Image (spheres, rainbow, N blue to C red):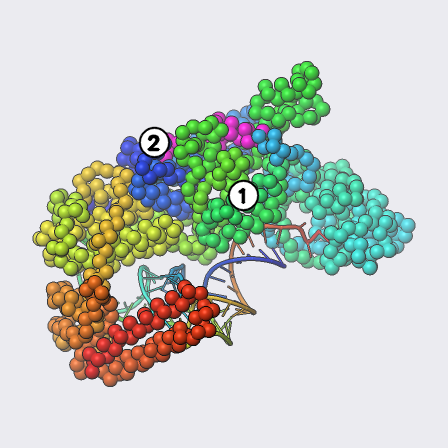
Amino acid sequence: MDINTRYFPKDVEEKRLKLWDAQRPFHATAEKSKKGAFTIVIPPPNVTGVLHMGHALNNTLQDILTRYKRMQGFDALWMPGTDHAGIATQNVVEKQIAKEGLTRETLGREKFTERLWEWKKKNGDTIINQLHKLGSSCDWDRTRFTMDEDYSEAVKEVFVELYKRGLIYQGHYIINWCPRCETALADEEAEHKDHNGNLWHIQYPFKDNPDEFVTVATTRPETMLGDTAVAVNPADGRYAHLIGKTLVLPLIHREIKIIADDFVDSSFGTGAVKVTPAHDPNDFAMGRRHNLEFINIMHPNGILNKNAGAFEGLDRFEGRKAVVKALKDEGRLLKIESHAHAVRRCYRCDTVVEPYLSKQWFVKMKPLADKALAAFRAGKPRITPKRWEKVYENWLVDIRDWCISRQIWWGHRIPVWYDEEGSPFVAKTEVEARAQARAKHGKDVPLKQDPDVLDTWFSSWLWPFATLGWPKQGADLSYFYPTATLFTAPEIIFFWVARMVMAGLEFMGEVPFSDVVLHGTVRDAKGRKMSKSLGNALDPLEIIGEYGADALRFSMVLNSGQDIFISKDKFEIGRNFANKLWNASRLVMMNTTPETRTTDWKALDQGALDVTSRWILSRYQGALAQVSEAIEDYRYSESINILYDFFWSTYCDWYLEMVKTKFDDATTQRVASLVLRGILKMLHPFIPFVTEEIYEQFTGREVALTNEPWPSVEARWHDQDVDAAVGGLIDIATGIRNIRAQWNIKPQDEVAAVFVGPSEESLALLKENADIVRKLVRLGTVTFETKAVTVRNAAGGVAGEVRYFIPLGELIDLEKEKARLKDLISQQEKAAGSIEARLNNPGFVQKAPPEVIEKERERMDLLRAKNAELSRALQSLA
RNA sequence: GGACGCAUAGCUCAGCUGGUUAGAGCGCUGCCCUCACAUGGCAGAGGUCAAAGGUUCAAGUCCUUUUGCGUCCACCA
């Protein structure tokens, strides 16, 4: 790939990837460099994952910070890996074996698990390879998987330890049950989705008077088959006299009582609630309070069981229809009202979740959440953007216990063994469990391991330290933990972020990351979430093929404010930018020598530099400071905007145009090269491929730019005076252009510019660069005139900015311009005067805090200074 | 039902602590293949900053209300 050819992203990127694979410049060791460790752990994508735009954004952001920190001299570790994604992976493999006419049941647990591992071995690296193609500078040698052997040790250790600490318990509760996956789900895995359903009003007759009845309303009529009471609010006058009476449940003819419970909202429906303790969390609670019977009417797969009487064997939704029809036939269906409400659905397969009574393992969350809450209130972690802090905090405050057992086969088997009585023995190994059982029974007894596996998140919440070798206490763990910044999507604050904080505090005694950065969701141009099922997803790999990974990264970050609305054409910006960089570099390379290209600051004599050089060096220093600050503050879109503007508008459009004719001068070559190298470095975290390729050719050194130092701030080169002067020059040229258009000045007409501020210096500058200005302005003649006063600061430097310019002569309406100026001046004086009055008001001075007074004074001074400038301009017009 | 966010040019968005004539990219119009770049250059059109009140000498920026859109949370059957 030669810079004298056109820019082909694909060639550049393939070449760099090969080099990185060979040189391994991203490998981090706990060797302790001067600056210390900087660690980021990747939010592990599902092994079933295929790179989508969300990953592309998420990983680009991580890569930017990692590369930036690495260039700054940190031992930067970006830990990659994948998540075994229990239900998701099992679903994939189940579909696969279904093609062979097999199910997991027919295959059996052992064989099925083997198939899962086979699948993992074959396809598990897909997403890792794709992340690699994106240019992610992960330490690939360390790639982890949540079901690696040592990682599994960590999971077991945590389960056993939490159990010992009394934070894990087993119990019969109503949990969210997915009848399709046939497993329990955590609350967070059962998503609320709006549903236009019905409210069925059903009459329950009294036992002693079948002509009288109580009407209840329900959205799930089939559950009435499991009713064991009807509840009313004790304060509800309509029903008070009925409390304790007996009703007869239609269809089933079970006798049930009317009970009183504060939970019931008298204003909803009829004010009387059917109570189904085995199929509704509230009813479950009421059932416990009132010692009701718990009648399960459903098999785990959603088919009604024998408790459903005549409806046995029907699927729950068929059952619903049948129950409604039967009620209607019996004349017990009073009315059907349409009713919009939310229904919980399985986050993996979208099946309507059933509240289901079953025995599961839970983590007692309150003690864990309290620690996390205390840490958060002490400032850890910081959350960016801040508005998510409240969301995070509220969840911790309203924490509920976490159901962690799953009735699937892919995952970490629960480390619990039962004897024949069903007593559990919690241990890391079967041997230990046996020992416990022996101690209890005084002899060896047969044990059976719990068939369930743990929630996937029960392993991912250990990610920041389990990937570093915990529970072993190695050098990596102590050096790289805690990590720095976690980049993730807001959707998994609860699933993952908050839980990692809890695990980190519980087992490492430290919050696992100092910062959490939550970025937006990637959406299509219409604002819809990108998803395969909608068919609106852009494939990052396709974009990489067409525009290049650099372009993908650049455009992604440029557009990353809140949610990102992206369409294919957006990537042209990134491609065009990389192309421009390529070509500008080519220009500089054609006009420089290997020696001048690699000159550093020390070889430059600041006093001997011309104004143009001092200006671009100063602007470069300004951009460098701004970009560094923006990266540190996680304002990536802003940092890339600063770079775009500095490189394209300042460096290419102005600077290179100005020096094009002066490249025979070695100093000009040195300065142009120096700044270009700085630009390449600053852009490297964002677009690593093209910058490194150019850098290599430009300097003639085969280097991994990622290990080159980030440019240092050379404060002395930041020269505000020169900045202002050349800024003024550019202002003038731009202004003349505008004025020329505004007043229809023809190219051959003579134009004079009057400007205010550092007149002598600026005038000299203008003269020095008159030909360039002339060229840029495309005028026949330009003369520069100054009648303004030079303003100098205390140090004798030039103060103020070149701000005001105007063509002279009959070409414009001078009177009008003077009037405008006068108006402006009087307005500003009025403003300054009113601030002054406020500052002189004793009441204000007493009450206002000092910083407010100081600010007001600054404002006043600023207004007055500007006014002085404008007055001088006005004078010069007179 | 609760919490939060957004509304600025045709489109996608900048606009930090309020301060001269509100910016960029894309798109559009006109002129240019000038030996780094047509994935480019130069010039130009296009905005009552969602609406209404308020605070202020000064509001796109702060406060209140309204409207529209979006997100998260949620055991009203």
> Which residue sits at x=80%, y=51%?
A260
**Magenta segment, which residues?**
A138-160
**Foreground pick, B7 / A316:** B7
Q: Hey, what amino acid is under mark 2?
A: Glu
- The rendered magenta stretch, by its main secondary structure, is classed as helix
> Hey, which quadrant is residue A744 in on the image?
bottom left
Write down the residue under mark 2.
A31
- Residue at the left extreme of this rendering: A664
In the rendered view, does A700 fall on the left or right side of A156? left
In the figure, A281 relative to B24: above or below?
above
Q: Is residue A1 magenta?
A: no
Residue A359: where, in percent of width, then height?
68, 34
> What chain letter is assigned to the residue under label 2?
A
Residue A438: where, in percent of width, then height?
66, 17
Residue A739: where, in percent of width, then height?
23, 74
Tag 2 secondary structure: loop
Write down the residue under mark 1.
A372
